[in-house]
Every structure is written in C-alpha cells, then in structure tokens.
Amino acid sequence: MMISSLIIEINKVGESMNGMVSVKEGKRNLISHNVVDFLNPDYVYIPILEDFSIEIETNSQVFKEEVMLRKGSKLVYAPISGTVIGATESMRVNDREVRCVVIANDFREKVNHKKSAMKYINEYVKEDFIELIKKYNAYEGDIPEDIKVLVVNGIDPDPFEKTASFIIDNHSSQILETIDAISSILKLDTTILAINNNDSENVINLTNNIGTYPNITLRLVPDIYPIGFKEVLVKSILTKKQEKGGYLYLSAQDIYTIYNVLKRNKPMTERLVTVGGNAIDKSFVVNVKIGTSLSDIIKNCCNIVNDDYYVIVNGLIAGKTLSTLNNVITTETRSIFLNTKDTQKEKKCINCGLCNSKCPVGLNPKYLKDHKRADRSKCIHCGLCTYICPSKINFKPYLGGNDE
C-alpha cells in the first residue's frame, strides 16, 4: 500500500545496515507530546482465550485486577471494576471473531486489597523474579540459566508509531531502575538499552541519567527502517559471539510492565497506543484500558475527516489491515491508523530489484511471490518490500504476513 503523505529515502549507511531505508514523516503524522487519557470506557471486552476457564459469573461484581480467566498458571485480569454482563461474539481481535467477556464499568477502579510497594526491586532473588513475571504475564518467554546479555528495545518498530518513545519519555526513571534490577537479579555481564538517535528528548534525558546506572549501556542507533524489529536490532548491536551465546530480549513495554509487577504486584491493565493516519484530524498517543474497543477510542478522542478509510493496527508499513473498528485493544496492540484508501492500482513488476536489494534479511520477495513452495521462514514480515515497490505490488499475502 502507498502512504500518501510520506517521503522515503534510501539511506546510504554501512554494510551492517544494508537493506534498510529512512522514512520521513509528513505534517499529518506529527504527534503531540502530551498523552491523551481514555481510561473510562463504558465497557471493556476481554477475549476468552482457547482452553481458558471463566472465573467470574454473569451479573457478578468484579474488582480491578481480579482474575477473570485461567489456564493452569496463566491468568487474565480485569482492567476495570464493574459488573460482568455476559459474553459477546460481536467483537474481534486482529479481525478474527472472538468470544469476549463484557464488563460494564462502574468508574470506581475498585480493587480487592491494596498491595504494598517493594522499596528496592533489585533485592528479588532470581526464582521469585521469574515466578512473579510469569504470574502476571509480564514476559512469556523462558529465561535460560546461563543468560549473560540483556537487550532492551526502546525503538518503535514502525516509524509512524511513538508508543515506545512515549513509554520511555513518561517513565524513564522506572525504565532505568527496572533494567538495572534485572541486570542485578540475573547477574548479567552486558545490558544494552537501544533507542533511536533521532529521539532527541529521550537521548538527552537518558544520557543525563545513565551515569547512575553503570551496568546499563545506552546504544543510539540510526533512524532507519526496520531497525526496531528484534531480528534486525539484535544483529546490529550484538557481536556474533554474544548473539550465539544467547540473550534476553525485552521491549520498553515489557520493562515497564515488569516494573509494575516487581514494585506493586500489578498486572498490565492499561497501555499506551499510537493513534494516527490522514483520515483523522490529529495524531496522538493514548493511554487506554486493555479490552477497550477501537471504535470507542476513535469516537471519544478524535474526529474522522475522511470516511473513505481503512484501519490498520501495529504499524502503517507492517501492520494488519482490519475490516472494522469493532476490534479490541490487547496487550499486543501498539498502534491504530485510519488512512485514506489508495486508489493507485497494482502494476506489472518492472524487475527493478528494489525488493531484493533492500530486504533486511536477504530474501527475494518477487521470487517468493512467484514460487509458492519456496522457503519463507526467514521473513520477518516488516513489509518493506511492499512499501518501496514502485509497481505497488502487495507482497504480504505471498509471504505469510499480516494481510495474508
């Protein structure tokens, strides 16, 4: 798809950065520095995940942070307090119809009991640390016994998102405290926080405060796409020996979620989400409850200026196109865009070779499009091939990506 208000430049960088591009924002994509709060939706919708049992009854009262769904040791928590009014099948997650528990908000934010804060979060032992982050779904992966390297990604995966940047900007002291605590708890040798070198406010803020945390190395990386993708970032900042030896990778959102777990035993009930696109009157970052519908956010926080739009989540370049705003915010939602539909038609390939030469993992998207049985396992689904194609070819359906 083509994004009308953008200019793209091929970035001539070193060999290690080969295959990436620089993307400049148009005026419509400028985002206010102030976070918009939308924390009082009338209803939230909690997807009933496969094999999870429902722990609350219809018409019962539920407290904020109360367990709603359970599958063994995995738990799903209520983001608000209110009344459970039943289940619905009218809502979607990533455009797939999903049965959801519906909670009517009482706007009181009642909790069953307040939890005292841990004064020094670096005093946890490793076993308790792992148990807590698993209990509160702060991190799904395994933490190997002999891990020695931590990579924290403070870069937004998509150049039109500001979610990670805002998390660091609004919670920089908590981010640094938590990274330092993880380094201490896990007895790591190397801890790297990577941010975009054009993220000027965070560069200044973190540079001024990083000296208090000698265990953390701040790494400034070029403002090129798709440097914010795990596979690309890791190869850019770790040595081959460090990469081969194993590492723990966490996002800025992971770090802030872990902070709340370690500090207050609190699950994630809210998250920052970038809202943008040229079909709405402004672009902004909103703090929103998990389970809020996209339609409620758009209706209450901005105005639609062009009704001929499509909805895309988690990045304009690599994101998934949705058929409706009746989707819900999950713990994985980073951004929502309403963009005007592109009237330019796909043309015949001119064999320019851009998709091949600019693929960050060295694939040939045209070959993969033409050969259904070719190996696509290395594709990171960054969408760069589709974005730079002068013939407007959408490669995503042929690569097993978001718009398949």
Image (cartoon, rainbow, N blue to C red):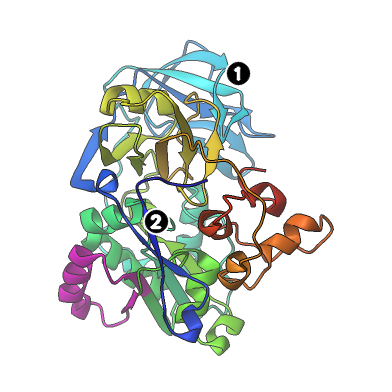
Q: Secondary structure at mark 1?
A: loop
Q: Residue at x 54, y 56 (%)?
A: 390
Above or below, comparing residue 16 to residue 255 in the picture: below
Q: Residue at x 31, y 54 (%)?
A: 25
Q: Image check: 44 left or right of 38?
A: right
Q: Image check: 67 left or right of 385?
A: left
Q: Image check: 208 left or right of 243?
A: left
Q: Which amino acid is tagged 1?
A: Glu
Q: Residue at x 27, y 59 (%)?
A: 168
Q: Image check: 251 left or right of 387?
A: left
Which segment is the magenta one? 193-221
* Label 1 crowd (10 A; few <14 / some 14-19 / many >=20): few
Per the model, the C-alpha gap separating discs 2 and 1 is 32 Å
Tell me residue 18's x, y (percent).
Answer: 51, 78
Residue 249 in sight in this render: yes
Residue 89: numbered disc: 1
Q: Nearer the viewer, mark 2 or mark 1?
A: 1
Above or below, comparing residue 245 to residue 291 in the picture: below
Front-most of residues 271 and 383: 383
Which mark sits nearer the N-terminus, 2 or 1? 1
Tell me residue 68's x, y (percent).
Answer: 51, 29
Tell me residue 395's x, y (percent).
Answer: 64, 52
* Label 2 crowd (10 A; few <14 / some 14-19 / many >=20): many
Residue 28: numbered disc: none
Above or below, comparing residue 28 to residue 48 in the picture: below
Residue 184 in sight in this render: no
Front-most of residues 46 and 261: 46
Q: Which amino acid is tagged 2?
A: Ile
Residue 258: numbered disc: 2
